Image: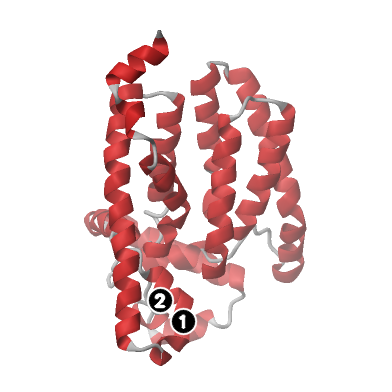
């Protein structure tokens, strides 16, 4: 849901912060609590603890304590999600981890008319099929949609690969979706000049931030190589890119990365000065 984007982004930032802190049981408990709440907002974060586990190993070089913490994080996260899962089972008669739209989004992103972004159902589901699907419950519709998506991917591997590239473009090309979703149906009441100014300012900030981030990230990688910090930054970006490739993507989906872009972009220039770096080491 669009309204979940802001708290979801904050929760992801908290997860990254906790990962950089020392491994303790209190840290694992807090991480598990935040993970469970975040997963209820958006299930795309369900596999994120596995990535954080890898970062813990890179940091501490000790896989066993990191594995214990991972199990604790997943257990606490599951405890947070359990009431919602019980509700889903009572409602649909089937186990649903978090939501019932994974199959929908997968089929929307993998069909002959797919663009990589959001489509109306009528654009890729025949009318008769759409009417038949209305007789199914949410779980059955989602399962059927996933079956159709998998069938398309298997029979059209080249097109599916091309769509994956298009999804990356949809994900990062522009940031003005926040204006669209913020105004929703009331955009007609906003003067065209004001609307255009909002879009220009939004995109100007986004691209300025993006360019500054890329420069800072390049300099950071040049100085630190694959340190735990750079692995966390690059890995987080890869995670929130790859997780959408089987489904659909749009501009607002990159919102959890914006705080990370800003933090890296704000690293002071003096930090990248090699003379300063040598002085710090000495």
Which quadrant of the figure contains the C terminus?
top left
Q: Give the image location of residue 250, x and y in percent.
A: 37, 64
* CA gap, disc 1 and disc 2: 6 Å
Q: Nearer the viewer, residue 40 or 9?
A: 9
Residue occupying the point 29% across, 62% down: 204
Q: Nearer the viewer, residue 142 or 212?
A: 212
Which quadrant of the figure contains the N terminus?
bottom right
Q: Nearer the viewer, residue 55 or 195?
A: 195
| Residue 167 seen in the current view | no
| Helix, strand or loop under label 2 | helix
Q: Give the image location of residue 54, x and y in percent.
A: 50, 29
Q: Give the image location of residue 223, x and y in percent.
A: 31, 23
Q: How is the image coloured?
A: secondary structure
Classed neighbour count for the residue bearing mark 2: other residues with Cα under 10 Å, few (<14), some (14–19), many (≥20): some
Q: How many marks?
A: 2
Classed neighbour count for the residue bearing mark 1: other residues with Cα under 10 Å, few (<14), some (14–19), many (≥20): few
Q: Is residue 92 left or right of residue 170?
A: right
- Above/below status of 226 relative to 186: above
The image quadrant that residue 85 belongs to is bottom right
Residue occupying the point 46% across, 62% down: 146
In the drawing, what numbered circle is on residue 28? Answer: none
In the displayed orientation, state which residue is furthest to the top. 282
Residue occupying the point 30% across, 64% down: 203
Residue occupying the point 65% across, 59% down: 96
In the drawing, what numbered circle is on residue 184? Answer: 1
Residue picked out by circle 2: 180
- Above/below status of 175 relative to 194: above
Q: Are marks 1 and 2 in contact (CB under 8 Å)?
A: yes
| Residue 273 seen in the current view | yes
The image quadrant that residue 87 belongs to is bottom right
């Amino acid at each position: 849901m669009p309204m979940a984007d802001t708290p979801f982004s904050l929760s992801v930032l908290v997860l990254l912060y906790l990962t950089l802190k020392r491994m303790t049981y209190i840290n694992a408990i807090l991480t598990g609590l935040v993970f469970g709440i975040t997963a209820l907002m958006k299930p795309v974060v369900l596999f994120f603890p596995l990535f954080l586990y890898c970062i813990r190993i890179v940091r501490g070089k000790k896989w066993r304590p990191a594995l214990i913490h991972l199990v604790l994080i997943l257990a606490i996260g599951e405890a947070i999600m359990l009431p919602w899962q019980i509700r889903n089972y009572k409602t649909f008669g089937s186990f649903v981890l978090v939501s019932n739209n994974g199959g929908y989004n997968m089929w929307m992103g993998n069909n002959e008319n797919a663009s990589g972004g959001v489509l109306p159902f009528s654009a890729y589901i025949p009318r008769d099929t759409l009417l038949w699907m209305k007789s199914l419950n949410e779980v059955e519709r989602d399962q059927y949609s996933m079956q159709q998506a998998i069938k398309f991917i298997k029979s059209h591997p080249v097109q599916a690969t091309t769509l994956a590239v298009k999804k990356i473009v949809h994900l990062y090309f522009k940031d003005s979706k926040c204006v669209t979703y913020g105004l929703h149906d009331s955009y007609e009441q906003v003067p065209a000049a004001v609307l255009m100014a909002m879009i220009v300012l939004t995109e100007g900030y986004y691209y300025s931030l993006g360019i500054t981030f890329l420069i800072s990230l390049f300099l950071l990688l040049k100085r630190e190589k694959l340190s735990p910090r750079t692995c966390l930054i690059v890995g987080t970006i890869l995670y929130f890119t790859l997780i959408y490739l089987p489904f659909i993507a749009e501009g607002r989906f990159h919102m959890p990365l914006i705080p990370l872009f800003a933090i890296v972009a704000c690293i002071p220039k003096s930090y990248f000065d090699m003379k300063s770096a040598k002085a710090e080491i000495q």
